[in-house]
Image (tube, rainbow, N blue to C red):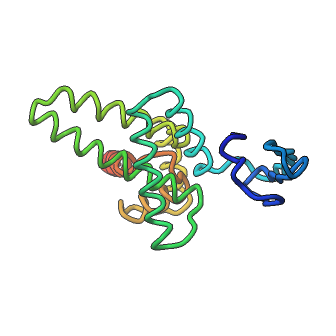
Amino acid sequence: MVRALRSHRRGQLFKSARVHIKFQFKNKNCLYYNLIIIYRLFDKPMTLKDRLVVEMKQAMKAKDQLRLDVVRLLRARITNIEIDQGEINDTQVQQVVQQQIKQWKDALVDYEKGQRQDLVAEAQQKIKVLQEFLPTQLSDDELKSIIAQVKQETELDQAGPLIGKVKQKVGNQAEGSKIASLVQEMLGSH
């Protein structure tokens, strides 16, 4: 880290989400810098975008090419969205992750039809990596109890509005297709 920072000029201040680093010369002829690291108060937890940066660095160090490719692709997608829409929060990042998972699952179906087992295995590994960036997914039983609770509170009997209310309550803890199938199942049984 120090080697990369030696080329910076005297007194330059770098800011990141958690660290301020101030560089000063010990004397004019000295090649070393006096690093003063001041940690900010951690008033909020690490964001998902920060976690992606850390994961990318770890994948580089571990020479894990598959993980590195997945994280880079995800960060590129997030950057493109931020260019179009402005800064996005963790919930929106999780939605991007879910979109990526859905795309890989669609590709997985095509790979299986084409009998490409090498690509099937690779797509499954990429899906596993992406799922690490989502919150813990709800089980079917937990989801059914939430659906029953929302149905009782709102007294909705139509699938569309009920699915929307459940998605609002659950957030990114369940896939939309899973919610829709369970709602259809519960409405069909009544």
Q: Position of residue 106 (x, y in %)?
A: 24, 45
Q: Is residue 190 shown left or right of residue 38?
A: left
User: Residue 68's quadrant in the figure?
Assistant: top left
Rendered residue at 9%/35% (across/down): 114
Nearest the eye: 129 or 109? 129
Q: Position of residue 73 (x, y in %)?
A: 40, 49
Q: Is residue 46 shown left or right of residue 39?
A: left
Q: Position of residue 183 (x, y in %)?
A: 38, 50
Nearest the eye: 65 or 33? 33
Nearest the eye: 148 or 92? 92
Q: Is residue 63 shown left or right of residue 45?
A: left
Q: Is residue 58 shown left or right of residue 156?
A: right
Furthest toward the front, the residue is 29
Rendered residue at 36%/63% (across/down): 160
Furthest toward the right, the residue is 27
Rendered residue at 83%/59% (across/down): 11
Vertical comparison of 54 with 159: above or below: above
Q: Position of residue 178 (x, y in %)?
A: 37, 45
Q: Quadrant of the N terminus?
A: top right
| Total tally of numbered discs in the picture | 0
Nearest the eye: 22 or 175? 22
Rendered residue at 55%/45% (across/down): 52
